[in-house]
Image (tube, rainbow, N blue to C red):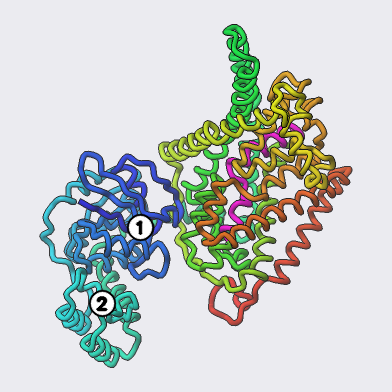
């Protein structure tokens, strides 16, 4: 039996899906988390359950609605579970009125019943059943209540007759059209023919034209508007009969929004929150864990080396395992505690509902840049990994805006870039590691703004999508779901370290240990890798101030996986003759001993903005749709990274005190503000929105 989960965005579909199937699909307290359908089997049954993207109607104005509508018409589910947010009944029931027009059995699941009660509201489920003509179950997907009753209803024979929601004139026309079309979901399609839905235009006939003309004369207005109005009249009638307000309460969400969405406090609070996230993960708390893990990895490597020597293992094989695999993989795994702290912070911000507020705050700015607040969702997801972030651009309707967002998402510091940031910030800016890490996050936001400004004025000149989104209730982070989310991200990171990075570490060890004559044990400076690096190291001279071949080959390996940059540096340093431990990457005698604060920051900047890993490049290829666009994108990203890193080093190496730095940052901020105000798109006229020049 096929069962579909259909509902508005952020109504709790994926939470219910995870509970019923035992799977761990991504959830979040903001709209648009699910962008593709997911399928699993309901535990203890043979029912196939499909979690569909959140939609507001079955009129496919967006990609999500198209996916859901195709599922209903092409995969023919036996049952549709319509998840309804009880706290927003009027908005949620619009979709319900369309679902009950289908031939498929529908069960309405009133979710978030616990929140409704806290608001002093109650819904009479029996009366709601009578009005809709379908079974209604009250549940709380988060607290896992009422779900057994919901599952038991799936296999019951439907006895109720679904309600008809329009006035007698429209119902008469629908009945007349239904008699002339012999197709599944004939009532739904009949209504769509009256609305002149182009997807069913092949079923149009003279009888349909006559009915449409008759109704148009009767109502003297657009039929689509009349049908929508009739739906809302029906919903309003249901609300009056089924909803009771026990007492009016101002919820915690309203109180918190007065602070977090305050005209003057909103942006400073956002800056402080993001600073604290990086200060905790890379600064005081996170940095204290790195040495502990590094010592354990070194001890393990030493134990393995001594064991191999005792067993008479060949020197080259001992070096491969200890200096290549353990040093390379261990260098990356050492940053897992910091990643865990970062993932916990980001996951808590998502589940509380704060990220939706950030989308609203940045929407005004993004609209000036040819984007919208909806673009922020891929950026949020991209902070964990660029690949799902790029895939998340599918929720954006406008093609140009979607492509531009795909290009810019890799600029956000993802978990793979955190080891690079943590390594350099922790070593060269030991007392200010958290501040330096946070500065890179805000640097990324500034670069995204400037890049979007350039792209919207050159390549993407017709981006003009609107952004409409609900603000979800603030919720206390659920420990179980935060733990699942963090666990999945950490396991994905470890898997990559145990596969891609392991293989790359072996390759790096081989190139470092052999010359082009395949002589083993040569000096690092005479190895194949050093020869290759020295050939192209001149490219990085403006960034590093020296021809550093080690940094060059490590940065290039970032194309495979950004974590590989640190892994490669650890292997190179570990095989350098004057270094006893692979963790002493910047010690004297290694190719990296020439780094200073300016070149360290510039190197972080380059790796932050350069072309992403192969996985993210593959995702961009799918979203951009052509190799030509992909090549241009990779070139744009890499050139941007080189220019920004060069400017960073050339300016940074000339800053002698903090006062110079502050003055330069103020001047840069002023220039950015002037550019945005000078080149941002102007409104052609007043549309009544709070964002255009005439309304603001």
Q: Quadrant of residue 110?
A: bottom left
The reply to whether residue 647 is visible in this rendering is yes
Which one is in front, 304 or 521? Answer: 521
Q: Which residues are magenta?
A: 405-430
Quarter of the image where the C terminus is located: bottom right
Q: Residue at x 35, y 85 (%)?
A: 222
Q: Which mark is residue 191?
A: 2
**Residue 302 appears at what percent x and percent y?**
63, 15
Q: Is residue 510 above or below residue 440?
A: above
Instruction: Report how far apart the C-alphas of labels 2 and 1 lie in the structure.
Output: 29 Å
| Circle nearer the N terminus (2, 1) | 1
Is 409 left or right of 656, judged from the image as shown?
left
Among all residues in the image, which is located at the extreme bottom? 217
The reply to whether residue 273 is visible in this rendering is no
- Which residue was labeled with disc 1? 87
**Residue 331 appears at what percent x and percent y?**
63, 29
Which one is in front, 267 or 412? Answer: 412
**Residue 145 appears at what percent x and percent y?**
27, 43
Q: Is residue 131 magenta?
A: no
**Residue 221 appears at what percent x and percent y?**
34, 88
Dominant secondary structure of the magenta stretch?
helix
Q: Is residue 455 above or below residue 290?
A: below
Q: Residue at x 72, y 36 (%)?
A: 424
């Amino acid at each position: 039996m096929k069962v579909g989960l259909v509902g508005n965005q952020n109504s709790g579909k994926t939470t219910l899906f995870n509970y019923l199937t035992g799977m761990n699909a991504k959830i979040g307290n903001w709209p648009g988390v699910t962008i593709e359908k997911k399928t699993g089997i309901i535990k203890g049954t043979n029912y196939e359950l499909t979690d569909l993207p959140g939609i507001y109607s079955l009129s496919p104005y967006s990609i999500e609605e198209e996916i859901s509508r195709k599922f209903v018409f092409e995969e023919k589910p036996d049952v549709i579970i319509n998840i309804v947010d009880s706290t927003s009944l009027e908005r949620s029931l619009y979709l319900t009125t369309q679902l009950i027009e289908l031939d498929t059995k529908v069960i309405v699941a009133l979710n978030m019943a616990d929140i409704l009660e806290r608001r002093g509201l109650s819904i009479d489920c029996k009366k709601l059943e009578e009005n809709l003509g379908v079974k209604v179950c009250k549940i709380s997907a988060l607290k896992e209540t009422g779900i057994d009753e919901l599952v038991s209803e799936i296999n019951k024979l439907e006895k109720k007759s679904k309600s008809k929601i329009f006035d007698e004139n429209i119902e008469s026309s629908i009945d007349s059209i239904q008699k002339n079309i012999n197709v599944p979901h004939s009532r739904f399609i009949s209504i769509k023919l009256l609305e002149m839905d182009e997807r069913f235009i092949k079923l149009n006939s003279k009888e349909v034209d006559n009915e449409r003309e008759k109704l148009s004369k009767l109502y003297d207005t657009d039929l689509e508007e009349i049908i929508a109005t009739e739906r809302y009249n029906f919903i309003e009638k249901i609300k009056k009969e089924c909803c009771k307000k026990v007492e009016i309460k101002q919820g915690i969400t309203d109180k918190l929004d007065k602070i977090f969405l305050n005209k003057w406090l909103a942006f400073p609070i956002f800056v402080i929150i993001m600073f604290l996230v990086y200060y905790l993960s890379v600064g005081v708390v996170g940095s204290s864990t790195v040495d502990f893990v590094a010592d354990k990895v070194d001890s393990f490597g030493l134990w393995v080396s001594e064991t191999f020597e005792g067993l008479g293992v060949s020197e080259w094989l001992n070096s491969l395992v200890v200096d290549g695999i353990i040093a390379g993989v261990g260098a990356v795994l050492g940053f897992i505690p910091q990643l865990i702290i970062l993932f916990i912070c980001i996951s808590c911000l998502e589940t509380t509902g704060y990220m939706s507020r950030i989308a609203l705050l940045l929407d005004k700015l993004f609209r000036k840049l040819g984007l919208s607040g909806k673009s922020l969702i891929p950026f949020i997801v991209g902070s964990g990994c660029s690949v799902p972030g790029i895939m998340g651009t599918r929720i954006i309707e406008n093609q140009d805006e979607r492509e531009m967002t795909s290009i810019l998402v890799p600029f956000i510091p993802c978990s793979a870039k955190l080891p690079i940031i943590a390594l350099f910030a922790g070593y060269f800016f030991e007392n200010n590691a958290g501040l330096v890490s946070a500065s890179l996050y805000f640097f990324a936001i500034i670069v995204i703004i400037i890049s979007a400004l350039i792209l919207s004025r050159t390549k993407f000149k017709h981006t003009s999508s609107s952004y409409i989104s609900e603000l979800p209730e603030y919720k206390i982070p659920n420990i179980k779901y935060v733990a699942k989310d963090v666990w999945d991200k950490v396991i994905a990171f470890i898997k990559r370290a145990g596969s891609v990075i392991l293989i790359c570490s072996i390759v790096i060890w081989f190139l470092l240990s052999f010359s082009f004559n395949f002589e083993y044990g040569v000096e690092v400076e005479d190895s194949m890798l050093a020869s290759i690096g020295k050939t192209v190291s001149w490219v990085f001279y403006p960034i590093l101030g020296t021809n550093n071949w080690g940094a060059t080959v490590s940065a290039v390996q970032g194309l495979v996986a950004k974590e590989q940059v640190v892994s490669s540096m650890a292997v190179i340093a570990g095989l350098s003759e004057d270094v006893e431990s692979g963790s002493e990457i910047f010690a004297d005698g290694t190719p990296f001993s020439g780094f200073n604060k300016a070149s360290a920051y510039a190197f972080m900047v380059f790796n932050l903005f350069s072309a992403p890993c192969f996985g993210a490049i593959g995702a961009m290829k799918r979203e951009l749709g052509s190799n030509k666009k992909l090549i241009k994108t990779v070139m744009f990203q890499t050139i941007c990274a080189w220019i920004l890193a060069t400017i960073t080093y050339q300016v940074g190496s000339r800053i002698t005190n903090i006062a110079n730095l502050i003055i330069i940052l103020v001047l840069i901020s002023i220039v950015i503000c002037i550019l945005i105000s000078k080149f941002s798109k102007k409104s052609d006229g007043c549309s009544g929105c709070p964002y255009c020049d005439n309304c603001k």
